[in-house]
Image (cartoon, rainbow, N blue to C red):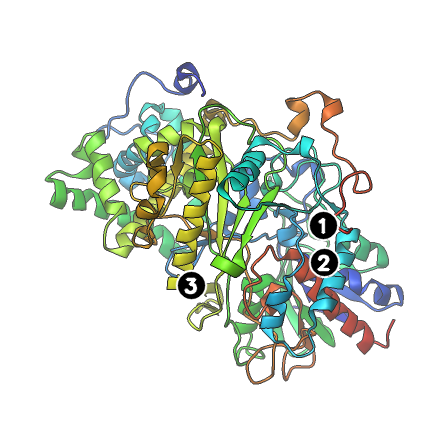
Amino acid sequence: LPSRRAINSFAPTTPYSAQSPDSGPRLSLLQPIQPIFRAVATAVVPEAEYLKASEWAEVEAAVEAALAGRPPEIRRQVVQFLRALEYLALVRCGHRLTKLDRNRREAFLLKIQRSRVYKLRRGMWGVRTLVFLAYYTRPEVSAALGYRASAAGWSARRPASDVRSPTPAQGTSPHA
Amino acid sequence: MRELSYDVVIVGSGAGGGTVAQGLGPLARDGKRILVLEQGPKLEDHEYTGQELDMASVLYEDQGGFLTADGSMTLAFGRLYGGSTVVYTGTSLIAPQRVVRRWCVPGLDWADVEQRCRKFMVENEVHYLPRVLLNENNKLFATGCLRAGYRAEQFPLNLRGCRGSSLCNLGCPNAAKLGTHRVQLPNAESDGVEVVTRAEALRLEERAVIVRVSEKTPGSKGLPSTWEPGEYRVRAPLVVLSGGAVGTPALMLRSPVTQHVPHLGHGFTCHPAHILVAEHDHEITNDVGHPKSYYLDRAEEERFVLETCWYFPFTTAKNLTGFGHDHSRLMRAYPRLQMILVLACDKAVPENRVTVDPHGRPVVHYRFTREVVRAMVMATRASARIFFAAGARRVHAPSADPPLIERQDSYRLDDLIREEHFLPGRISVSAAHLMGGCGMGTPDASVTDARGRVHGLPWLRVADASLFPDALEINPYLTIMALADRVAESIRDDFGGA
């Protein structure tokens, strides 16, 4: 397991506050719904609660970049869905999504993911996938998870003499 | 628009297009002008960084997240010099005899397909990796299969000097994988075949392709195109389409000259897949070594295939069901995870097909049939048995609710993993074996004949996975090459047997 220290190495001490979003570079798509996006993101990945302002900016830029190549209707749907979540929470939980504490947000969103309405499930899947894309592709997060893949492959883990792949003539042939 | 003339134009450079290009090398040596158009760029060796986000955006259409029409499944296919052969794992299996016979394509004989597959196995240096180079993620699968009463088989792989980076799906950073970008395309180019990258086929005209060549954007990966940016009309007496099971039908459907071909886009299959993960008590080697060493073929008996696999953090996170605390805890167990890829052997059905939207963009319509759901659930149960037999502490099964199954509950897998929990939208389903859309067969019920000739259009051939009349039930690239080799052979015959 990666140590708690390693995990905390990218986690500052001030937790995220949905009510006071950090100011970062202007984002054309997420900016108007930044509090909702962050409320969802911290429920999807609890560790995101400890992202610094600059790290939030990177996460949101990654989401923006991922959506930039998508058709306009997809980008519109993402924004509409996030707005819908804010008010669905009001209907179902009595408070807007951004006013719920983290555990209640997660519980509410998990219910959305299991909804009988396919469009709600699909929307939730899309949003959580965007959050994962922006969060888990961060090199410091991968490293903290213990992900160590590299071009060096086996030679980074074993003596070089053990790891040379044979040529087909030396290896076992499937042609026999 | 600039006008150019060639003798043959090939659209696409993957397993199909690369093979046809090489097959037409003798014609190029004889002075015929052969052109390959590839929509994506050609990467230089140093550009394969192994970084998930960095590579996905350049290797895959829609970063690997191309969605079906209803958004229930993502399709992964390559879009660069070498096509999907750059991003597969190099698994090299021969088409099953039962499948080719079931296709019932007049003029297509399994023995011929098998012989050509074997030819490419030699050409691509296909062999089995020695046990010392297999990681524990793979060995645990073989052990689990043995203990659970299954017989795992080892994948033959087309590698040369594999260092075990485990990064196959992001393009091998060590140039070890022998896809068409390493073998067939360079061979073709040395024979005089011209390959032009960043060249998107916009539409077909009779004996012509309208092409748009894009400029390399500053800071992006890949070599610039050898052609000036702009639009071209490339005339040729013969056009070969090798844009894959999504690209080829879509190109024909948005072209007035071909869009009325009967059955076009029909018969799309893709081996819908999802990833199962198990957590062990101790760390295992999983992100080092070739990721896909073993498989379990239950296609004939139970309509599924299991394969070992290993994916990067984002892909893993995406493919786990759910989010929040439980998901996060499983992600933090990354070094202790074992993975299995579950593939359902789907069947061509009328509603699963490729169309285009008003802008000409491909749209893939796919509905999970009852049989596919059943196959995926049975495959998930089998995988869970294999995981627990291999010593796993808990298993993450998408078709269970909640998805985490503890070891003490392993005796009731049939109760926990159920079809009713296979909820599209809740679980992640993806596919990388895209097939059909220009199926071979008789003129009244198909798009092409056994040599890829489009019925009624003598100037047009197809040479890619869209030729498959139905799912192949194994990893398809070698079969695509075999069929493309037949197409190339028939073109050589047409040109007088060069």
Which numbered disc flags the more N-terminal residue, 1 or 3? 1
- Pointer 3 residue: B366
Residue at mark 2 to residue at mark 3: CA–CA distance: 28 Å
Left or right placement of residue B132 versus residue B246 in this view: right
Q: Nearer the viewer, residue B475 or B97?
A: B97
Chain under numbered label 2: B
Q: Residue furthest top?
A: A5
Residue name at image x 10 percent, y 40 percent: A94
Residue in the foreground of this view, choosing between B94 and A78: B94
Q: Residue at point 76% right, 46% down? A: A173
Q: Is residue B396 visible?
A: yes
Same chain shared by disc 2 and disc 3: yes
Of labels 2 and 3, earlier in sequence is 2
**Is B174 above or below relative to B236?**
above
Q: Which residue is mark 1?
A: B181
Locate residue B271, reporting x and y percent: 50, 57
In percent of width and height, residue A36 lies at 25, 38
Q: Chain of mark 1?
A: B
Identity, as a three-letter code, of the amino acid under mark 1: His
State whether residue B448 is above or below residue B49: below
> x and y percent of residue B437 in the render?
54, 69
Amino acid type of the residue that numbered disc 2 sits on in the rendered structure:
Gly
What is the secondary structure assignment of the residue under circle 3? loop
Q: Residues at badges 1 and 2 in contact (C-beta under 8 Å)?
A: yes
Q: CA distance from mark 1 to mark 3?
A: 30 Å
Quick one: SS at disc 2?
helix
> Along the horizontal axis of the image, is B392 left or right of B175?
left
Labels 1 and 2: the sequence-earlier one: 2
Is label 1 in a helix, a strand or a loop? Answer: loop
Instruction: Say few, some or many: other residues with alpha carbon within 10 Å of mark 3 (under 14 / 14 to 19 / 20 or more).
Output: many
Q: Quadrant of the C terminus of chain B?
A: bottom right
